[in-house]
Image: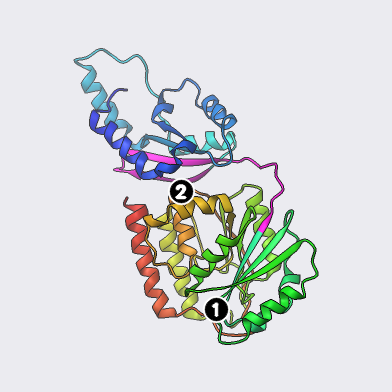
Amino acid sequence: MNILSKTYHNYLKKLVSSLVPKDQIKNYVIFKNTLAYSEDVQDEVQLTYKKSKTDTRVLVIFFNFLWKPFIDFIQFFRNSNAKKQNSEPNWLSKDDLSNLFYLENFEKIREGNKLSIFAYQIYRPIIKPNKKYSVSIIVPARNESGNINGLLSKIPKLGGRIEVIFVEGHSKDDTYQKIRNEIKNNKRKDLKAFVYKQKSLGKNDAVKLGFSKAKNDVLMILDADLTVPPQELIKFFNVITDNKADLVIGTRLVYPMEKQAMRLLNYFGNKFFSLVFSYIIDQKIKDTLCGTKVLLRKNYEIIKRNQKYFGDFDPFGDFDLIFGSARLNFKIAEIPIRYRQRTYGETNISRFKHGLLLFKMALVGLLKLKFR
């Protein structure tokens, strides 16, 4: 079926460039409608899996099956004055492709349509690494004096070695001294802890400072308010080290919360923005602002290199990771957590000020991800 004009070839090229960042093209296997002519699609997918690594991505571009009658009509018209083509192509629906890739140990990250006539799907191989991982836990802390004591003892055993990096951000109470005391009293041989004072402002800056000091394989963010219990980190660790996702985030919107854990307006705001951001990134996400997030350091370095694409206006750091992961076609997974009310201090989130920022981020995401 040779109906693709030069215009369509150029469009396919633009489609690939919109879905694949330039610095990641070496990690991609790209099928530009070629599976339509494969003698055995499953064999071809199986061969692709055998050559795949954990960071391999497969981009499949194909004609939307709903256009088949229209294309058949064009083909009939063209063939009335031309030589009949040798073979009828495979008309693969998105469900056909999803099934074949599933059978050969791939999982689908996202899918979509461009101009309706073209559809695309992006897959990652399910490969469990044979490696023992080390962990760096970043703990941003501002005015959290009452939550520091005993924090290190609550962290579960994770991988080969653990480092906890506290980043203290201009507290008005004695948070910094409490952190120093906690580090001094640490008796765990599998865990080392450090503290750094933040020069700039905001959680995003604190997380970036902590990540820049981290030396281990897995990066974790744990808020010092302990509304997410440190014991939950083992679940995040298992998902990331089993290669079941590239970014693992907590969701507070599954289990019942303690009464004062989240204000009602914040709750409905989170529900609304979960729908908006799920649409933008083409992956289901229930809770964009849960502070607990986990990813491999090597993947963070890739996200960091691409941060200029979205601009620098995220005070939380959550959307640097979420939007960055979406653009790089990283798999995002959520883990339900029990969200507890604070036992000390007050939230640093401003409902209205930061709500406006979320709208701004949604707009940026639409322009940079959905309509690129």
* Quadrant in the picture for residue 34: top left
Above or below: residue 216 compared with residue 123? below
Q: Give the x, y percent position of residue 332.
A: 53, 54
Q: Which mark is residue 262?
A: 1
* Quadrant in the picture for residue 223: bottom right
Q: Is residue 64 left or right of residue 265?
A: left
Colour setting: rainbow
Q: What residue appears at the point 64 percent right and 58 percent down from the top-left corner? A: 236
Asked whether residue 343 is in view, the answer is: no
Q: Residue furthest left?
A: 81
Which amino acid lies under the numbered mark 1 shown in the image of this protein? Met
Which amino acid lies under the numbered mark 2 shown in the image of this protein? Leu
Q: Is residue 229 left or right of residue 289?
A: right
- Whichever of labels 1 and 2 marks the residue nearer the N terminus, that label is 1
Q: Which mark is residue 141?
A: none
Q: Give the x, y percent position of residue 73.
A: 25, 27
Secondary structure of the residue carrying numbered label 1 = loop
